[in-house]
Amino acid sequence: MFDVDVWQEIFSTIKKNKLRTFLTGFSVAWGIFMLMVLLGSGNGLQNGVKENFASNSINIMWLWTGDTSIPYQGMKEGRTIKFNNADYTFLKEKGENLEQVSSRYYLPGTIVYTYKNEYGSFETSSCHPALLEMEKVIIASGRFINDMDMNDSRKVIVIGENVRKALFKEEDPIGKYVKLNNVPFKVIGVTHDKARNDERTNYIPVTTAQRIFNGADRVHTFAITTKMVKTVEEADSITAKVRQGLAMRHKFDPNDKKAMGSFNMLTEYIRTMKIFQAIKIFVWIIGIGTLIAGIVGVSNIMLILVKERTREIGIRKALGASPASVIGLVLLESILITTVAGYLGLVVGVGIMEGINYALEQALASGAGDGIFFRNPTVDFTTAITSMVILVVSGALAGYLPARKAANVKPIEALRDEN
Amino acid sequence: MIQISNLHKSYVMGSNSLHVLKGLDLDIQEGEFVSIMGSSGSGKSTLLNILGILDDYDQGTYHLGGKLIQGLNETKAAMTRNEMIGFIFQSFNLISFKNAAENVALPLYYQKVSRKKRNLIALEYLDRLGLKEWAHHLPSELSGGQKQRVAIARALISQPQIILADEPTGALDSTTSFEVMDILKEINEQGKTVIIVTHEHDIAAMTKKIIRLKDGVIEEVIKNGDLQLFKDRVRTE
Ligand SMILES: Nc1ncnc2c1ncn2[C@@H]1O[C@H](COP(=O)(O)OP(=O)(O)OP(=O)(O)O)[C@@H](O)[C@H]1O
Ligand SMILES: [Mg+2]
């Protein structure tokens, strides 16, 4: 069935019906093209949103405290809740489904940074070494805070690009001392601050912060990474457990959002991704719909073609063509038209999306694309292959009816002289 | 070669049924040159279609080359046609978008002969029929006589034992008709059984046996020796 002759037969009929073949092929190509563009765009949007999430671990959770707003166990509302180091130990050791914990102590007042004759005030974060991973801090040079810095409450600092520029100019800051309100801190690393706000660019060990800035064992906020779960319900239950544990320790109603605030990124992430899944399904439905329209077109054309070729098919049968060979002729032609047209649509669609992606990457690299909420709007290989398989199958479907009709042509009826 | 006994064939159209062949008996030996005559609608084409396994019959038996032809599936029928029978039609039935050589080679395509080989054989047959220069022309560029010669080459290429021709000269002028008949005669002399349907007495007179159909049965068989008689009768009719 797959020898050169069959193809020669098919090409000769296609050549005879160029325009019609083109029009049918075009509708199939258009269907696949639309599918690719829509899927690519959906992916681009999804990747853009993912990228937004990617400035932190997606399973990060933040906790902070305030005043109670619900009376609890005979205690009036309005009590101020404060975290401390014991809470850190509690979360670290008892926290179910939690992976890493970092506490933060807010340095009081404005901190003035001084190096030689240069000075300025900057935001300062205090944290545990784990924060590097949790908030995806990027180290441009040197290193981040480590356990020894923590244990010895070393006066070390990881500075941001802004501080390096303002105070050190062209100098290499690593190993130099910068004064924070007259207390010298040794610079151990510089962060890469692209697309990050200033507040998150200078880090000192939380133990050092508490000691130098009279914090005792006070902690203001926690950053926690939780177990990676798949559903909103699971993520919510992790949040609830954390709230319950801390509410017990500090005696407030676990539902009191004012006493302790919490934000679980994973919940939001899962929710957003669900929306994109729905969008994707929608896109497939539209794409397949367009494709079906194309396939019906092919099927129609093939039916007309078979009708026109009734006499020819009759001749072939009289000369010894088996029904199978006639079916092969029609089916292969239909598959050929859909596959070639569909492949062209696929290539053009994927090509356009890759082109957009290239332009986007250029824009981002040059810094012009900062506001674009769109990343890597391309279709992956599996999807392209899947579409191809769908095409071949649909080509066969489109050809099935006409092929059956052709196989049923009776030579005597086809050959009867009408004159 | 061909043995038919008590052959019945009706065409059913809705509630109507037209009984065309009514218990026909026929015996044709290998190497015969037979013409079938009869008035229009007498069932000549019907009989020829059954002989060519293009149609089936209702009752009786049909043996072709000693084999009973009955209830063959389409694939088997196609194979038997391809191997045993060459067809020639009144309206040539060449495939319009294929050139002469490709048309001639088509039966060999269904025998899975390689493209190169069958094109070579096709050229050989076209040459025999004096159409070598026309091998690469489309049917639309050929005259009626040329088209029928292409069709004859196509009927011969699979080397069948039987040639069936339904009014092969029906669309041709008399000179060309006689040319075609000469070719058929030559083919018959090479040992093939040739059966033609015709309306024209002078064409029929060129065959060795005439079968006259009437009312679905054979009315008369005129054999070789009586042909002169037949010719005289035609003249007076
Ligand atoms: N497929 C068919 N369905 C119904 N009736 C048919 C069919 N084919 C032929 N007939 C009828 O059967 C009868 C015999 O037809 P057939 O074609 O065999 O005649 P014929 O002898 O070849 O006539 P002609 O000389 O005009 O070609 C005619 O009345 C015709 O109308
Ligand atoms: Mg007839």
Image (tube, coloured by chain):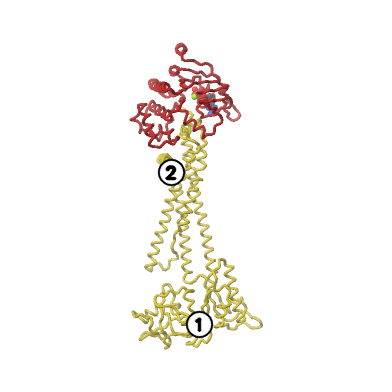
Chain colours: A yellow, B red
Residue B27: x and y, percent? 52, 20
Q: Residues within 10 Å of mark 2 (few under 14, many from 20)?
A: many
Please tell me which of labels 1 and 2 falls first in the chain: 2
Label 1, on which residue?
A: A105
Label 2, on which residue?
A: A21
Looking at numbered disc 1 in the image, what kind of residue is underneath it?
Tyr
Element carrying mark 1: loop
Identify the subunit bearing mark 1.
A
Residue A132: x and y, percent? 46, 75
Between residues A341 and A388, which one lies in front from this camera angle? A388
| Residue ranking furthest to the right | A74
Residue B149 in the image: above or below residue A198: above
Q: Is residue A92 visible?
A: yes
Residue A111: x and y, percent? 44, 85
Q: Are marks 1 and 2 in contact (CB under 8 Å)?
A: no
Residue A218: x and y, percent? 53, 84
Quarter holding residue A370: bottom left
Between residues B119 and A167, which one lies in front from this camera angle? B119
Identify the subunit bearing mark 2.
A
Residue A190 in the image: above or below residue B152: below
Looking at numbered disc 2 in the image, what kind of residue is underneath it?
Thr
**Residue at the image position 55 percent from the left and 27 percent from the top:** B68
Residue B166, labelled with which disc?
A: none
Q: Is residue B22 visible?
A: no
